[in-house]
Amino acid sequence: MPQAETVVTFLEMKAEPLLHIAPPSRLKLMLVRAEKPTLGYFRYLYDAVGRSVHWQHYGSLDDAGLAAIIHDDKVEIWVAHVNGQPGGFFFVDARPAPEHVELELLGVLPQFQAQGLGKWLLAEAIRACWARKPQRVIVETCTLDSPAALSLYQKLGFEAYDRKTKMAEIEG
């Protein structure tokens, strides 16, 4: 599989922000927690959002490994429905340490991008992370992600604390 160099930026938020991001008014939205989602549904969301930005980690897990993660009580998967269909999702992970909650994944399906959904979804993800009462919320992004990702995280209150260059496998 071909590889590409990417710069990973690690970001953190040490205090809960006072955010009010209104949902995009022209979209019919509903945010729902997918409790213990089926593997097929999670794989669909992961692929639909992540294919264009080369997400691979969760896609390469076998069924037992994936189920152990997404069905863990310390993991939350939230899905934004747009006009009755999945438009994006986020994945909150408090497994490693409850005082450090990670926004593991966040993304919008390509057909719903550039409509304000990502900013609203990120604000909702931040709210879900802080609902677990951590001392710190962390997230990472890389140069393979959407070009708007890093600046959006920073606009909503995350601060970079580290950067690393690494090689990532990408589909050709």
Image (spheres, helix red, strand yellow):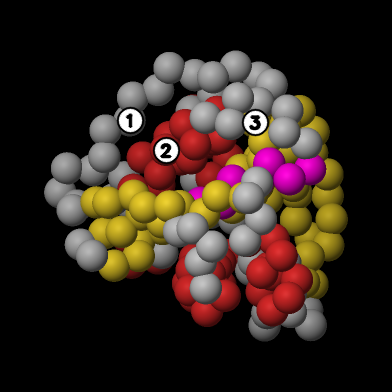
Residue at the far front: name it.
73
67 to the left or right of 91: right
For the residues labelled 2 and 3, the Cα–Cα distance comes to: 13 Å
Residue at left offset 41%, top offset 64%? 109
Q: Nearer the viewer, residue 110 or 4?
A: 110
Q: Which amino acid does label 2 sit on?
A: Glu
Mark 2 residue crowding within 10 angstroms, few (<14) / some (14–19) / many (20+): many
- The first of marks 2 and 3 along the sequence is 2
Viewer-closest of 16 and 73: 73
Is the residue 159 above or below the residue 25 in the image?
above
Q: Name the residue under label 1.
A: 21
Real-space CA distance between mark 3 and mark 1, rounded to the nearest whole angstrom: 18 Å
- Quadrant for the N terminus, please: bottom right
Residue 9 visible to an observer of this rendering? no
Query: What's drawn in magenta, residue-wise?
Result: 89-96
The disc label shown at residue 137, or none = 3
Residue denoted by label 2:
124
Does residue 92 show up?
yes
* Separation (CA) of disc 1 from disc 2: 8 Å
- Mark 1: few/some/many CA within 10 Å (<14, 14-19, 20+): some
Q: Which residue is drawn at 66% across and 55% down?
A: 72
Q: Specify which label sits upstream in the sequence, 1 or 2.
A: 1
Left/right of residue 135 with respect to residue 24 in the rendered view:
right
